[in-house]
Image (tube, rainbow, N blue to C red):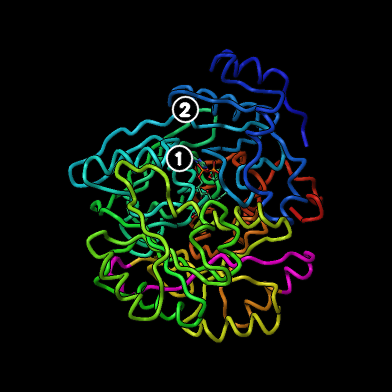
Amino acid sequence: MPAFPTTLIPELRALLGPANVIDTGEALETLSKDFYWYSPVLKRQLDDKRADVAVRPGTLEELKAAVAACARARVPVTVRGAGTGNYGQCVPLFGGVVLDLARLDRILELTPDGVVRVEPGARLGTIEAEARKAGWELRCMPSTWVKSSMAGFFCGGSGGIGSITWGGINAPGNVKSVTLLSCEETPRLLKLEEGDSKRALHTYGTTGIMVEIEMRLAPKVDYEQLIISSPDWEKLVTWSDDAAHHAAWGKRLVTQFQWPIPSFFKPLVKYFRTGEHVTFLLVARTQAEAIIADAAAAGLACVYRTPFSDPPKPPFITDYTWNHTTLWAMKSDPTLTYVQAGFGRNFREQFALLEKKFPGEVLLHLEWIAGNPKMTREDIGTHSGENVGMGGIPLVYFKSEARLQELLDYCAEIGVFIANPHTFYLEEGGRHPNIVEKRALKAELDPHALLNPGKMKSYPQNPFAPAAGTLAGTAV
Ligand SMILES: Cc1cc2nc3c(=O)[nH]c(=O)nc-3n(C[C@H](O)[C@H](O)[C@H](O)COP(=O)(O)OP(=O)(O)OC[C@H]3O[C@@H](n4cnc5c(N)ncnc54)[C@H](O)[C@@H]3O)c2cc1C
């Protein structure tokens, strides 16, 4: 790998100001990392990876100047939002420059018909608060919504809170447009609209630098946060599945946890009954009474009820759902890790098969989403509440990488879709039916193959990879 050019750092300092160029210390370490350590496999592979320098442009013009300098110097460029990705998407495999876009965080426009136009680093929490003031809300957001950036969500995430009704980022209509900056000596802008924007979604910053985003919003709903509890897993899963499919109930979240997962949620344990499974719901406040009554009629208890306040202020039950569950679990028991799954309508049979083959090793955490029950990233979401599927982020007691792989293989065998979170390769972490278009976009906007090199496994060029080398035991 060529040595990092010594003239680049003074050049970047002159362009952005010394305070916005970080080339040593804890700050550089932090800006080189994300939540990759969630995975014991990625932890082993990525612990020693680090950028040579991180830069923090404050305007589009500064960003263009920094990108042009990096392109001239032919160094790797890894874009960063809030750094909450959990597959090492933000970790530079070959050093180089981390482009931290947290300062480009303005909400540029919120139109009367519910479209928000933002800079890439705009925080979802800020957008949600502003949208709610104007009678709107985000259609979908990750459980890291308070911190994470809009572009980071589009380039590294997939869906989350709201996806039960609106699907994920790939669902038709959710994204109005994305504008990308090329990584070359004279950076160019390219705007992709509507379905065409999918070429740039969930591509880990390999297909251009997102500089502006237009996302459609949903009409605001006042929500109630509910937790329903039962010692009977089967009864609870039947009720939760019915609730998720109930077309007349307004919902932003339906999440079910198998005991002992609730015991990991320390701030909430006082509400839980030892040994009982729980379902977390965000439902329309006007329907909360009817939903609690329905649960009671099914023999289930509501053990927690509190409004989702407006403007949003904690407590948020969303802080325990989606991939936050994994965080609480790992805090309680560091031997736990996770997989990201999509179950079929034969989910009962799939649960039983998993328990038989891996007794006591898998703890079920289920998330319902609008879309294909097998959780393809493409075209999920119908906005109708009818085409709802069951996904989830089950926890797994980690024994060895080989045992984890056995589990992933077995899931494939029994028809459980897995978006593997133990790989930094884009193509292995989910389905990309449009990977040919994604590669073409990369070729168009990243002609020197500098953007997050090594992450798009099927891209033929990587000027930084050792010829026939390996990266910590994994072929690059
Ligand atoms: C506790 C926890 C819970 C989570 N829950 C969810 C969840 O519910 N749903 C979900 O989808 N994800 C989830 N995630 C993953 C992650 O938090 C989200 O996807 C989040 O939206 C990422 O935003 P970010 O700003 O932190 O992105 P980053 O981590 O900074 O970046 C993510 C990827 O996008 C790229 N990128 C960032 N900005 C740009 C840009 N301007 N142009 C091009 N590429 C860019 C980066 O290079 C990187 O590859 C979770 C992670 C954790 C740790």
**Where residue 398 appears, x then y in whole percent?**
74, 64
**Magenta stretch: includes residue 391:** yes
Q: Left or right: where does residue 32 sit relative to residue 296?
A: right
Q: Left or right: where does residue 340 sit relative to residue 64?
A: right
Q: Which mark is residue 67?
A: none
Query: Tag 2, which secondary structure?
Result: loop
Residue bounds of the magenta highlight? 382-406
Q: Residue at x 24, y 40 (%)?
A: 133
Query: Tag 1, which secondary structure?
Result: strand
Q: Is the C-beta of the residue carrying label 1 under 8 Å from the nearest atom of ligand 1?
A: yes
Q: Which residue is mark 1?
A: 210
Q: Left or right: where does residue 22 sit relative to residue 186?
A: right
Q: Residue at x 60, y 85 (%)?
A: 352
Count residues near mark 1 (Cα–Cα under 10 Å), then give few for <14, some for 14-19, many for 20+.
Answer: many
**Magenta stretch: includes residue 335:** no
Nearer the observer, 312 or 161: 312
The quadrant in which residue 226 appears is bottom left
Image vertical order of residue 469 relative to residue 375, above or below: above
